[in-house]
Image (cartoon, rainbow, N blue to C red):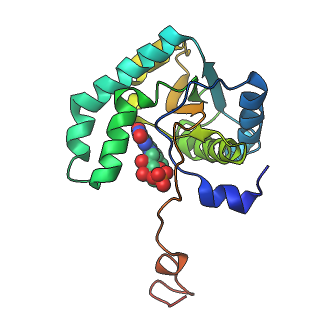
């Protein structure tokens, strides 16, 4: 297993997967890491639905495609650089739902204040992504389908008080991902006051 900083530096969105299966033990290890995240008032409002069923995955894939073709693609064109646009396109057109496991992440509004749901759920999602990376799995944080939240919720039988917040594919990358491209920390950091050189 790689160390934390190695996983942090390698973690990036994977949108194409091989057919190699992922054992439940590995999925559980990843989800357990997610549950160690902080949350407002320690409410731990995360809900994970692990989807392996081919029909449900295909239905989530259809939903993703609809969200993408129904406006998200147009919005992204001209905003994303061509390489990223092509990758997101491949993911939305079936790459993401082609993963052997899809984790639908929900936030339970019955046990946490609605306003704090995203800030309580996404730290867990980040833990999940890092754990997947450390274990050699591909993963991606996707929110496209949350634009069709009601339908996504219905596909995995979420009760009304659980809001769908992300769909995360888990599987083995179809090809190596390469390193993420990020701005240097010095361009994002200020000493004492905004504008203070780091
Ligand atoms: C809030 C959020 C929503 C995202 N939604 C999607 C999505 O719906 N589909 C997708 O392919 N990628 C999605 N991404 C992944 C980003 O495109 C990705 O993190 C970013 O481009 C960095 O690319 P890298 O992971 O390859 O370094 C999302 C990321 C975040 C943080």
Task: Name the quarter where the C terminus is drawn.
Answer: bottom right
Q: Residue furthest front?
A: 175
Give residue 178's position: percent from left, percent from top. 52, 55
Kindly tell me whether residue 12 is visible in this rendering: yes
Please give the name of the residue rendered at 32% of the width and 37% of the height, measured from the top-left corner: 89
Give residue 155's position: percent from left, percent from top. 48, 12
Decide which of 149, 90 is in the foreground and name it: 90
Please give the name of the residue rendered at 46% of the width and 83% of the height, measured from the top-left corner: 194
Q: Residue furthest bottom?
A: 197
Please give the name of the residue rendered at 54% of the width and 42% of the height, measured from the top-left corner: 118
Residue 130, compared with residue 188, is above or below; it is above
Give residue 41's position: percent from left, percent from top. 72, 44
Decide which of 119, 66 is in the foreground and name it: 66
Left or right: where 30 falls relative to 96: right
Q: Quadrant of residue 63?
A: top left
Residue 109, compared with residue 81, is above or below; it is above
Give residue 111's position: percent from left, percent from top. 66, 29
Kindly tell me whether residue 150 is visible in this rendering: no
Decide which of 186, 23 is in the foreground and name it: 23
How many numbered badges does the structure rendering display?
0
Decide which of 61, 145 is in the foreground and name it: 61
């Amino acid at each position: 297993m790689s160390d934390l900083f190695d996983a942090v530096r390698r973690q990036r969105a994977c949108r194409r997967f091989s057919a190699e299966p992922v054992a439940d033990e590995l999925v559980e290890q990843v989800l357990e890491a997610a549950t160690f995240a902080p949350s407002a008032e320690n409410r731990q409002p995360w809900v994970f639905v692990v989807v392996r069923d081919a029909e449900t995955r295909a239905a989530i894939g259809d939903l993703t495609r609809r969200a993408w073709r129904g406006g998200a693609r147009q919005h992204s064109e001209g905003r994303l650089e061509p390489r990223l646009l092509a990758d997101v396109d491949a993911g939305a057109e079936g790459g993401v739902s082609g993963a052997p496991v899809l984790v639908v992440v929900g936030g339970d509004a019955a046990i946490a204040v609605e306003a704090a749901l995203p800030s309580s759920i996404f730290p867990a999602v980040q833990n999940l992504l890092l754990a997947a990376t450390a274990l050699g799995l591909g993963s991606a944080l996707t929110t496209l389908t949350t634009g069709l939240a009601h339908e996504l919720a219905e596909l995995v039988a979420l009760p009304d008080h659980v809001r769908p917040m992300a769909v995360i594919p888990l599987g083995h990358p179809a090809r190596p991902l390469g390193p993420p491209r990020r701005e240097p920390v010095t361009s994002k950091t200020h000493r004492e006051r905004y504008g203070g050189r780091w």
